[in-house]
Amino acid sequence: MALQHDDRLRALTHQDSDFWADLVDSVLIVAITDTKGVITYVNDRFCEISQYSRAELLGSTHRIVNSGYHDADFFRDLYRTIEAGELWQGNICNRAKDGSLYWVATTIIPKKDRQGRILGYVASRFEITELMNTRDRLCELAETDTLTGLLNRGGFNTALADEIARCREPAGGGVPQAALAMFDLDGFKQINDVHGHHAGDIVLRAIASRLIEMTHPDDPVSRLGGDEFAVILHRTLEDVSLERYMDRLQGVLERPIDIETVTVSVAGSIGAVLLDGTDTMEDVQKNADMAMYAAKRAGGKQSQMFTRNLRERAQARVSILSEARCGVERNQFEVYYQPILNCRTLEMDQIEALLRWQHPERGLLAAEDFSDVFTDAGLAQAMGPRMIEAFRRDVLMWNEKG
């Protein structure tokens, strides 16, 4: 069967050679090179898409259309494959003579003699520029926040990973250290509650526009979700210090925003961390989060740089909250009372109830030693009924004893 097929193909090729050549030329972009990669033949479609004349291409190599898009490993794999006598297939981005880029789905076949020695290579290609552009647009949409046009969390994660990798490379002198700044909007919830989500969307878009205006175009700006934003600062810091940028950012956030018939204002709790390439992406985000929430706990409307001391305090807070949850379950919290004497009547008509923690390792703790416990809504909700019940029992006991 194979022999019959070969005979039939030879017959067709002999009878209709012009037809087959025209068909190939109308569909495929074809080039033939010698074993050193020097171009010995190109068809009209190659000249058309590359915008080079046949005279310019013949005697050159494919470096003439190299776009720089692919790295050395890409071409190393390509040449290793075809030099082993194997077929190579893949998509290549080339650059035309006018500088425009075009994509081609490429198949490279080694041309061999009867002894199997490679005489050259035949490359046939289909143009797929529009297909690849559509792919890129879909990838871009997948990483874009539809409301603001900024990067979404997925896009932010990609950009942050790239920036951390860049920070690990040797840097020249005078290059400012990159940083990550994260913030959320103080007062945003009230705008949503009072004026509706449409008004909240207007605020978010306004903040996004202001961020873009004050940040270098090469620096990624993201909306992570809700009213939380992040900016990866690199090129911006060539012209302004991080401290100055955060001061300007706070001022930009506080500028009034017009919403139809009303004007609203927000502020920001901003946290920032310097990037040196030593921390993982997860650690960098945690550090920026710690700084942001430290700014929020301090009252908001301010900036906070991440420090190791801040991490130690955050870890201590996590530890004390964990211990407090166990303490509530084991009834380690007690109420102590301090009489208040009425100076006019010289009678004790009031008492002050003081919460104390009988810690199993640190002993009796006053409230200021575990103040973080009161900022945890879940713990406060669990402690409240227990404290009220303890106070009720004590009042009953006092009344019984007169």
Image: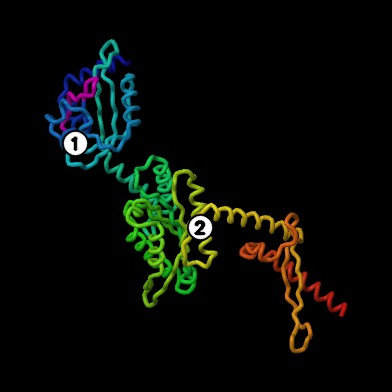
Q: 5 or 181, which is in the foreground? A: 181
User: Which residue shows up at 24% across the image and 41% down it?
Assistant: 101
Which quadrant does the N terminus fall into? top left
Give the quarter of the image for residue 260. bottom left
Tell me where residue 176 appears, x and y as whole percent.
37, 50
Work out which quarter of the rendered image holds the C terminus and state it.
Answer: bottom right
Tell me if residue 370 is in the magenta stretch.
Answer: no
> Looking at the rendering, which quadrant does residue 203 occupy?
bottom left
Q: Amino acid at mark 1?
A: Ser
> In the image, residue 150 lies at what x, y percent?
38, 56
Q: Is residue 36 magenta?
A: yes
Q: Which mark is residue 291?
A: 2
- Crowding at dot 2, Cα within 10 Å, few <14 / some 14-19 / many 20+, comes out as many
Q: Disc 1 designates what residue?
A: 50
What number is the disc on residue 345?
none
- Magenta stretch, residue numbers: 32-44
Residue type at numbered disc 2: Ala
* Residue sitting nearer the eye, 63 or 165: 165
Q: Is residue 40 above or below residue 254?
A: above
Gap in angstroms between the C-alphas marked 2 and 1: 53 Å
Residue at 55% x, 64% y: name it: 297
Check the image and name the residue furthest to the bottom.
344
